[in-house]
Image (cartoon, rainbow, N blue to C red):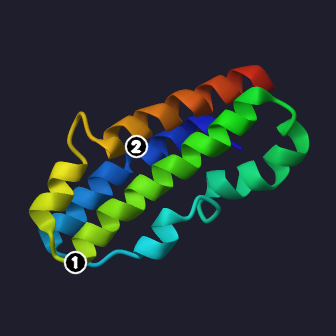
């Protein structure tokens, strides 16, 4: 699992949300809100758990990843409800989404270091 790529992919969600807002496109909020649908989530709940489930950083990464997807799902729900200004505000600095996004990035890198990946 390329964990640096996982950090990049999760950072890209902000851009995806902005594109959906500008194009007024619906998103799959249910899937976005689930932490076991993306490549990282599948890894953390599968092979990563088998190999590194004993590490504290694995548990933290799983928790922070889940929290990120919950916040991302809320943004997608706002977009789908055509609350575009609200959705835009939700992804700005200082928001729950922004904090969750930063936290998952840090957690992934700490896990990477402890796991020696």
Give the alpha-carbon distance from disc 2 to disc 1, as whole Å. Answer: 23 Å
Label annotation for residue 11: 2
Which quadrant is home to the C terminus? top right
> Which is nearer the eye, 95 or 106?
95
Residue lying farthest to the left in this orientation: 85
**Image-quadrant location for residue 52:** top right
Residue 117 shows up from this direction: no
**Residue drawn at the location 28% of the way across and 78% of the way down:** 26
Q: Position of residue 21 (x, y in %)?
A: 17, 66
Residue 10 horizontal side relative to residue 50, left or right: left
Residue 29 horizontal side relative to residue 84, left or right: right
**Residue drawn at the location 41% of the way across and 72% of the way down:** 29
How crowded pointer 2 is (Cα within 10 Å; few <14, some 14-19, many 20+) is rated as: some
Residue 82 shows up from this direction: yes
Report helix, strand or loop for mark 2.
Answer: helix
Q: Position of residue 48 (x, y in %)?
A: 80, 45
Q: Earlier in the sequence, mark 2 or mark 1?
A: 2
Residue tagged 1: 81
Q: Position of residue 40 (x, y in %)?
A: 64, 51
Residue 79 horizontal side relative to residue 72, left or right: left
Q: Position of residue 35 (x, y in %)?
A: 59, 58
Residue 105 against residue 69 in the figure, above or below? above
């Amino acid at each position: 699992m390329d964990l640096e790529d996982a950090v990049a992919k999760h950072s890209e969600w902000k851009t995806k949300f902005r594109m959906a807002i500008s194009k007024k496109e619906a998103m799959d909020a249910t899937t976005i809100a689930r932490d076991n649908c993306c490549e990282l989530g599948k890894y953390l709940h599968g092979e990563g758990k088998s190999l590194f489930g004993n590490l504290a950083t694995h548990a933290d990464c799983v928790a922070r990843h889940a929290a990120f997807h919950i916040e991302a799902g809320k943004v997608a729900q706002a977009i789908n409800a055509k609350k575009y200004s609200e959705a835009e505000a939700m992804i700005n600095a200082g928001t729950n989404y922004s904090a969750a996004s930063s936290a998952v990035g840090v957690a992934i890198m700490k896990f990477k270091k402890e796991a020696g990946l």
